[in-house]
């Protein structure tokens, strides 16, 4: 599998994103690309380096974004996710509107560092399409509208890291319904549960006291799967507004995992969806599985 982790600076929130992202990638034995997207400049990506088709190392030009990547590299080494080697610009190569560094293999997974320039969502989407990633890991946007845009337009599973505390003992709130992505969400939840030693609450919510056949079948399938892989879990049915129930049940000490709705793109963009509204309003990390 291939995961993309986006950081925006060298502050504590980015450190937390690196912490949880590396741990999840390790649990999946996934290749991990760490990407920093800076403001558009006239230096590397659109400048003489590209025109002359030379490597960054040949030009030996310093770019502000390299400081962020070097900081991320130092955090990786500190946490044991990268070898204790130096960050060397001689290993950076400019290619197709991005700058890349490949680090030595770590066990059975590969870590890469990538620098891009431009508008955040546009460049992140280009990186997702280029790398065909299974999951994008990023901080929760400050504005709800941006959460909506990321969930809507990034064609991959998305993990919004919100209010993550590395030393907390998290539980997993697995939101189960009859959507097509639910089974994949259940499978994702078991891998993350094992990595964080976190019990799962399997929750199905109906707006009324009636639970249709689709909801009941999905919930039963999730129970069977969790039992088969030996994950400790609690099973719940609740009535009410699904988003409100999810948020109340999760509080701040759960990781919410749910399917990422497909549906009509135009309708979703105008009205949103349960996953989008949950990601916008929750006070904890939310993983939307495609």
Image: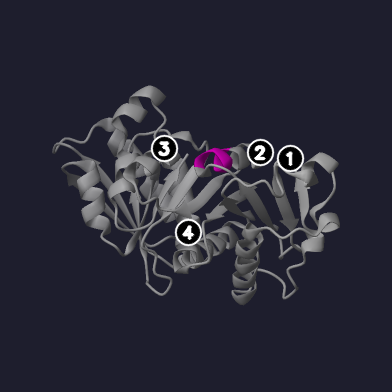
Which of 124 and 38 lies nearest the eye of the viewer? 38
State yes or no: residue 123 in magenta.
yes
| Alpha-carbon span between mark 4 and mark 3 | 25 Å
Q: For the residues carrying marks 2 and 1, which lies nearer the camera in this image?
A: 1
The span shown in magenta is: 121-125
Is tag 1's residue or tag 4's residue first in the polypeptide sequence? Answer: 1
Name the residue at 40% across, 48% down.
224
State yes or no: residue 108 in magenta.
no
The numbered disc on residue 130 is 2
The numbered disc on residue 149 is 3
The numbered disc on residue 96 is 1
Callouts 2 and 1 close, C-beta under 8 Å: yes
Q: For the residues carrying marks 4 and 2, which lies nearer the camera in this image?
A: 2
Is tag 4's residue or tag 2's residue first in the polypeptide sequence? Answer: 2
Q: Secondary structure at mark 1?
A: loop
Reading the image, the residue beneath label 4 is 192
- Using the image, determine if residue 271 lies above or below residue 97: above
Which of 246 and 32 lies nearest the eye of the viewer? 32
Q: Secondary structure at mark 3?
A: helix
Q: For the residues carrying marks 3 and 1, which lies nearer the camera in this image?
A: 1
User: Is residue 289 in view?
Assistant: yes
């Amino acid at each position: 599998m291939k995961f993309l982790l986006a950081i925006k600076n060298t502050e504590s929130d980015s450190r937390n994103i690196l912490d949880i992202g590396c741990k999840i990638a390790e649990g999946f034995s996934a290749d991990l690309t760490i990407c920093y997207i800076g403001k558009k400049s006239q230096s590397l990506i659109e400048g003489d380096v590209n025109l002359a088709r030379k490597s960054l190392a040949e030009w030996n030009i310093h770019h502000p974004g390299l400081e962020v990547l070097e900081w991320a590299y130092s955090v990786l080494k500190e946490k044991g996710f990268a070898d204790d080697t130096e960050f060397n610009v001689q290993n950076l190569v400019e290619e197709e509107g991005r700058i890349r560094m490949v680090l030595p293999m770590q066990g059975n997974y590969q870590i890469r560092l990538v620098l891009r320039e431009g508008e955040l969502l546009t460049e992140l989407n280009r990186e997702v399409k280029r790398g065909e990633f299974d999951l994008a890991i990023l901080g929760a946007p400050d504005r709800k509208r941006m959460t909506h845009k990321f969930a809507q337009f990034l064609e991959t599973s998305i993990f919004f890291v919100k209010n993550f505390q590395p030393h907390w003992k998290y539980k997993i709130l697995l939101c189960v319904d009859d959507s097509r992505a639910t089974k994949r969400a259940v499978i994702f939840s078991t891998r993350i549960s094992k990595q964080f030693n976190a019990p799962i609450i399997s929750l199905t919510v109906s707006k009324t006291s009636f639970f249709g056949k689709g909801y009941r079948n999905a919930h039963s399938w999730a129970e069977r799967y969790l039992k088969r892989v030996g994950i400790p879990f609690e099973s719940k049915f609740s009535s009410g507004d699904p988003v409100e129930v999810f948020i109340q049940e999760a509080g701040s000490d759960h990781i919410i995992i749910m399917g990422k709705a497909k549906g009509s793109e135009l309708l979703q963009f105008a009205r949103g969806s349960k996953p989008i509204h949950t990601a916008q309003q929750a006070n904890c990390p939310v993983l939307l599985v495609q």
